[in-house]
Amino acid sequence: MVALTAEKQDQNLLSRMAAGDGHGENSAYFDGWKAYEENPFHPINRPDGVIQMGLAENQLCGDLMRKWVLEHPEASICTAEGVNQFSDIAIFQDYHGLPEFRQAVAKFMEKTRNNKVRFDPDRIVMSGGATGAHETVAFCLANPGEGFLVPTPYYPGFDRDLRWRTGVNLVPVTCHSSNGFKITVEALEAAYENARVSNIPVKGLLITNPSNPLGTTLDRDCLKSLVNFTNNKGIHLIADEIYAATTFGQSEFISVAEVIEEVPHCNRDLIHIVYSLSKDMGLPGLRVGIVYSYNDRVVQIARKMSSFGLVSSQTQHLIAKMLSDEDFVDEFIRKSKLRLAARHAELTTGLDGLGIGWLKAGAGLFIWMDLRNLLKTATFDSEMELWRVIVHKVKLNVSPGGSCHCNEPGWFRVCFANMDHKTMETALERIRVFTSQLEEESLKQTKPMAAPTMMAKKKMCWQSSLRLSFKDTRRFEEGFFSPHSPVPHSPLVRAQI
Amino acid sequence: MKQLSTKVTSNGHGQDSSYFLGWEEYEKNPYDEIKNPNGMIQMGLAENQLCFDLIESWLAKNPDAASLKRNGQSIFKELALFQDYHGMPEFKKAMAEFMEEIRGNRVTFNPKKIVLAAGSTSANETLMFCLAEPGDAFLLPTPYYPGFDRDLKWRTGAEIVPIHCSSSNGFQITESALQQAYQQAHKLGLKVKGVLVTNPSNPLGTALTRRELNLLVDFITSKNIHLISDEIYSGTMFGFEQFISVMDVLKDKKLENTDVSKRVHVVYSLSKDLGLPGFRVGAIYSNDDMIVSAATKMSSFGLVSSQTQYLLSALLSDKKFTSQYLEENQKRLKSRQKRLVSGLESAGITCLRSNAGLFCWVDMRHLLDTNTFEAELDLWKKIVYNVKLNISPGSSCHCTEPGWFRVCFANMSEDTLDLALKRLKTFVESTDCGRMISRSSHERLKSLRKKTVSNWVFRVSWSDRVPDER
């Protein structure tokens, strides 16, 4: 009998789930995070460190939050003003959640959808963040081996959240840059057929709206076509709407909740929303995830499952108080959108000035950057190579499109809402240096004598263009560098944090 | 094709059990001293409500922790963003030290081996996902906490095979019971991955003896399987004996840093010892790095709120507070348990001698009409609907002998406890008289009626419900 090595013995004692890769963290994508963790940027202590642009966090309104908390000690069950509620809240573990919490969350969800729909507090089910919500929905709607259709590119965490412990499959719905990555019925049908051929019974379609990583919102017609598609197939529609309040500028967010009112024949038992306060309110640490289902049985069972990830009653109490302060909430949403717009403009203006393309979108905490022209070959190997350069040499942790299952190499998700203005400037400067190095090398080969002067001029132009709102998106390969623009200073760009 | 998963359409959540039905009845008609004095008293909820005053007074003296500040400055923003699944280092350190203190500082816990979870509910499920394939089995001594049917089996697909314990030896775990359970699993075609024990036990209220712990460690060593020790009641030990953890036994047997120690895992929580179930603070402690790593990643599905981690790291780091709390907690639990036990005794009811926990394991076998679970359920229904006490029937805890009930004592005021005992005594006395009559034949019953017996005896019959009017 062959003796097992110690590691093999270990693995036999663990489940396949624990010993395997289902958590997704062995993906190369995490190398960027590791690089950041080993050498995180700090303006004073580590000015050469890696800048984290791979973390979709909304840090722009933390000051408003902090101020509210300081001004409302009664929202805490620990302060003198709130401690009379301590014991009641501390023992409250009812998986229905505090009624005032559910009411406040329902109200907030309505506000972030411009009050165009009503949400029933009794359908609000808690979960351990959106992470927990997605897993719960998967457990409720699908058996192991069954699948969900998911438009690409999609949030890499779905591979873990929806599949790891549930045994459910994800079947990609391929979207293309040729039409701005919009979801088409043809793509849906193709994916559905692929699943059939692979013997994966499709139980639902999962959309993220606004999209991560694209930052785009679905328009009304598209949403209707998705509702019709799922309705006709008798499959579920799960709408992850965690970025609902991050729309800015002209962008409008339309929730699936609104659209089903316009599709009267829609079977509402198939409609479910995943929500969270992590992005809209910038509170990922508080772990407030929500499953909102129009299916009574799903609400019932998801609620029982929520025992595995209830929201801390201390947090429920705080959130109930905070979200009931309608003046605060209105002001918060308004300011958040303004600040997001400003930081977005700062990044995109900078990229425009460098001739770097990005997908036009008006939501989310990131942009979908187009670096296809920088790839040596239109392959994912080439994308990984470029990404490693960006992480290790340019020292920016961005997310490569391959990690989001994008079908075209060369796209990168770049987050902008998790840093201050100075850090953003530093990041842009690093990108400028990088692209100009690339250009210099290219110029040296084509116009060796003129190269230094041309590069110096470009640097000046770029620095002044940073202060301007800029619309020219011509690509880098044309060798064009945007001139000083006549467009007046945008008030959004001047917004300060 | 079915639209919902089998997890939804089946009863795997276990909530159709009588354990949970009693709760639902309580929700419909909850006792309140002033507003609803005839309502149902909740004695089915293992909560520790005896020491909130200690925590509240600590909060008053520690305004920084109470208002999420550090050195007078609000750190709300930082807490709002903290979602690292490794957890707050200072919190894990404080948890580790608290766990050590409960064990008399005889053993050490490395904070890096602690994985935080959303309550022990989540911790136990996560461990199952890490250790068992669907269809694998864990052996559990009966009676056991009804929630395990959901926590260990529902979404994981794991199975539970009972280790039958009997009242003949105070429900202690024996070697033959362990072996029988192991063989039973094999007969059922199930691969046994480990044993899970609750120490101190829910529902028994007793701590495992050193003999039992040694037996368990020897058993898992010989079978090369895991041992999960759910020690969430470790801080509720109020007996003369000190709490012996499985970690003590590993140390005493010099098994630390061996392969065996890698297969022993402890589950902890602050829901019982500190009485904070709403805060959802659970933990897994494992010596196996791979398990710590996998469980840490899985904790993404149920992290502890950063706001809660911060508050509790400050609370548990205050050693003066923790030692005072543990001592006072134990005193109050002991006193409350004594009150329940003597109240039951005056009603002619005995309990398993307990030294821990928030409940007693009460022997009502003599009140059963027949030695069957049907009779137990009948008795339970009377106690719930007529006596208006929600207690947990032994069958819901998979006890193999009918007539045992778990009765909680730490989730109510003394007055409420006294009232509950009074109601129970009245019920028992009426039932006793009823039983006396039932021993006679039907004819003797008729002739008894002719005798001069106080009227109220005639209104009582074992086949009728005790009247609602009190």
Image (cartoon, coloured by chain):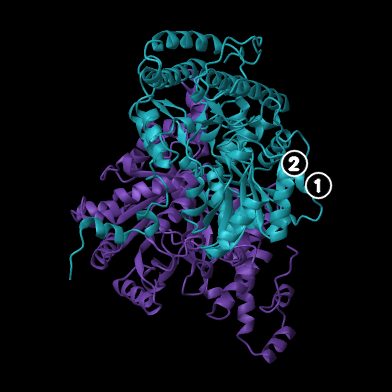
Chain colours: A cyan, B purple
A358 or B20: nearer the eye? A358
Between the C-alphas of marks 2 and 1, the distance is 10 Å
Q: Position of residue B299 (x, y in %)?
A: 45, 46
Q: Residue furthest bottom?
A: B443
Residue A435: quarter of image? top left
Residue occupying image coordinates x 49% and y 54% = A163
Q: Are marks 2 and 1 in contact (CB under 8 Å)?
A: yes
Dot 1 lies on which element?
A: helix
Kindly identify the amino acid type of the residue bearing the numbered disc 1: Glu
Q: Which residue is mark 2?
A: A220
B270 or A176: nearer the eye? A176
Q: Position of residue A418 (x, y in %)?
A: 51, 26
Kindly identify the amino acid type of the residue bearing the numbered disc 2: Arg
Dot 2 lies on which element?
A: helix
The crowding category of the residue bearing disc 1, from other C-alpha atoms within 10 Å (few below 14, some 14 to 19, many at least 20), is few
Whichever of callouts 2 and 1 sits on the residue coming sooner in the sequence is 2
A336 or B47: nearer the eye? A336
Q: Is residue B422 left or right of residue B49?
A: right
Residue B109: quarter of image? top left
Q: Which residue is mark 1?
A: A262
Query: Is disc 1 on the same chain as disc 2?
Result: yes
Residue occupying image coordinates x 35% and y 69% = B192
Q: Chain of mark 1?
A: A
Name the disc covering residue A339, or none: none
Where B329 sits versus A248, above or below?
below
